[in-house]
Image: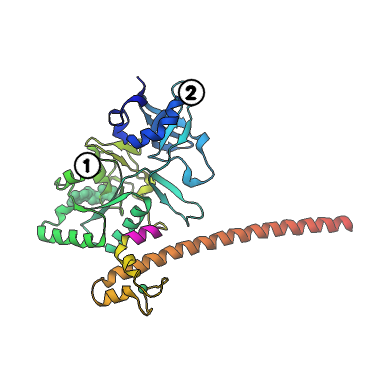
Amino acid sequence: MNPSSLSASSHPLARYGWDEGWEAEFVPYAEQGLLPGRVVRVDRGQCDVVTPTGTVRADTEFVVPRDPMKVVCTGDWVAVDPEGGDPRYVQTLLPRRTAFVRSTSSKRSEGQILAANVDHAIVAVSLALELDLGRIERFLALAWESGAQPVVVLTKADLVPDPVTLAHLVEDVETTSPGAPVLSVSALHGDGLDTLFALVGTGTSVLLGQSGAGKSTLANALVGEDVMDVQAARDVDGKGRHTTTTRNLLALPHGGVLIDTPGLRGVGLFDAETGVGQVFAEIEELAGGCRFHDCAHDREPGCAVTAAVETGRLPARRLDSYRKLIRENQWIVAKTDARVRAELRRDWKRKGAQGRAAMEAKRGRLR
Ligand code: GDP
Ligand code: ZN
């Protein structure tokens, strides 16, 4: 049976997220006799791809671009050689719908691609600690930046036994997270897990959040077995964390797909200026009413944002947080530019030294 002639929902890859969109995207490759597949792991120039005929190992040589952002990554949909090819190659990367990128620097220079085609970015926040709204905003910024829909999951709800207090905490986070649903769960008691299963049940999810936020525990609850080490079991230096599975992408028993890569575990703030804008949508909207279009919402006359803070419409904390994130972004970009300039200087110096050596050799010959 030709798998590409099946309807998208009964396709063997449906549980990995195959849908009509990918089906349509894949038509020209199906005509070439290639197999569709989703990358579940990448290492050393090769990757594991789930295909309708099982998991295959494929070489990524044909699709290795110079741009590190376009490197094959977990979550990518690809076209691979059918059985018989030895080695098999990834022939094409289907265009990504969303992408999580670690920008070690600015977008103009290199970034590192962490996961592709993610629909839900679950931001895990521990209720065991005092809520740090600024930190939540940061994770939301990078979630929005990826193109995925953020969801805030307040974990360890069993540590807040009073329902009124819990409701207030949820409310506080809701006002901080416009456009993102907020739910509370207890992996220990099982509260809220059904809501989470339902949410994650369609599409592909990733777990973001600070170390200790409960990501591994949530992953285990979603997968239904202990695939991830929980914090207690990890190495003393905290670095040797590993998963007991070789896959970074798993089809979940309640539906949906989970991507969990070591890179995603450690993501910090990206240069997520668009993301920042979405997290602070109400500020960006207010800014439309400022007299100056490049208003810094500081001491400018006619500033609609500071006016909103004065009337109490906008919490001062939100504006502070917004300005802090914007400044941080600018700092990251400036730092990168400084690094690029330093590299250029080294290059010039080297060229200068070569030039001087050549001149001296010439002089020596003339002498
Ligand atoms: P990660 O670093 O984000 O992956 O966090 P872990 O999943 O390793 O969890 C950190 C700690 O929180 C561990 O000691 C877990 O046992 C604990 N924890 C996770 N979920 C819950 C929960 O629902 N309730 C309670 N009380 N503790 C939890
Ligand atoms: Zn302003």
The answer to whether residue 344 is above or below residue 300 is above
- Mark pair 1, 2: CA separation: 38 Å
Q: Residues within 10 Å of mark 1 (few under 14, many from 20)?
A: some
Q: Which residue is mark 2?
A: 85
Tell me where residue 56 sits by quadrant.
Answer: top left
Question: What main secondary structure does the magenta stretch of the protein show?
Answer: helix
**167 or 267: nearer the eye?**
167
The part of the chain drawn in magenta is 272-278
Image location of residue 265, percent across then percent down: 35, 49
The answer to whether residue 219 is above or below residue 274 is above
**23 or 272: nearer the eye?**
23
Image location of residue 360, percent across then percent down: 80, 58
Q: Quadrant of the C terminus?
A: bottom right
3 to the left or right of 164: right
Secondary structure under the numbered disc 1 in the rendered image = helix
Name the kind of residue labelled 1 in the image.
Answer: Ala
Who's the residue at 31% across and 62% down the image? 281
In the image, residue 81 lies in the stretch drawn in magenta: no
**92 or 259: nearer the eye?**
92
Image location of residue 262, percent across then percent down: 37, 45
Who's the residue at 58% across and 61% down the image? 342
Image location of residue 148, percent across then percent down: 33, 49
Let me know if residue 343 appears in the view. yes
Q: Which residue is mark 1?
A: 221
